Amino acid sequence: MTQDSGEDTKRRLMDAAGEVFSEQGFKSATVRTICRTARANVAAVHYHFGGKDGLYTALLSEAFEAGLRLHPPDMGLPAGAPAEERLFAFIHSFLLRMLGEGRSTWCGKLMAREMLETTHALDHMVEQHILPLSVHLRGIVAEILGGGAQTDDPATRLCAMSIAGQCQHVFRSKPIIDRLAPDLRFDEAGIRSLAEHITRFSLCALKHYAHSAEKPTRP
């Protein structure tokens, strides 16, 4: 086997694995199905990745990095851009990575499945990719909250979780949303419109959060 043919086989395996894992999940996907889709020998997965686990971990890392390259969380904004604009960029990029089409969206689909079917790869993904994104979002949230809010404050973490949760809900509940709101589009324009809505909704909540927190809760 030549080096070129080996790299070609490896690339086909990654492409096939992206399709199969994102549709079937880690447990249900089989090496045989991936190899059949990739037009490769079943021994190729072990040769190139050491097995199904290694292929899955490599795919998650590559998909996450590819998605971030195509849709970075700042969407090209300068570091000094207003926090409101940076929040929209973060939300927009998040939705594009989950709801868009093509190879760059594998990450969102795979990670959504990972939440339901946790595998050995989760710790690596959190440390290498998700934690930096969380810190980035919490920094924006703390700036909007004001009043000396810090990225590690419980309120900041919860607010950031609420924003991320809105984005994740659309992907996870898409089969239901398609039936409840069949006119809602998920093309490029539709995703941008959804990002604008989540941003407006979140900004209203964040800007009133500190004030409402000071009021006593009714029994």
Image (cartoon, rainbow, N blue to C red):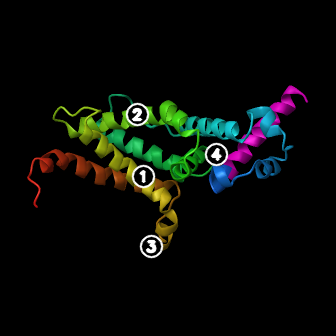
Number of other residues with Cα within 10 Å of mark 4, as a class: few under 14, some 14 to 19, many 20 or more: some
Q: Earlier in the sequence, mark 4 or mark 3?
A: 4
Identity of the residue drawn at 56% across and 51% down: 117
Q: Which residue is mark 4?
A: 103
Placement of the N terminus among the 4 image quadrants: top right
Q: Mark 2 and mark 4: span between their CA atoms?
A: 24 Å
Is residue 190 visible in the rendered structure shown here? Answer: no
Identity of the residue drawn at 78% across and 33% down: 48
Q: Which residue is mark 3?
A: 180
- Indicate yes or no whether the magenta region holds residue 124: no
Of tags 3 and 2, which is closer to the observer?
3
Q: Earlier in the sequence, mark 1 or mark 3?
A: 1
Q: Which mark is on residue 167?
A: 1
Q: Where does the image place residue 99, in percent across and percent down from the top left?
A: 53, 53
Q: Where does the image place residue 115, in percent across and percent down from the top left?
A: 50, 49
Q: Magenta segment, which residues?
A: 1-20
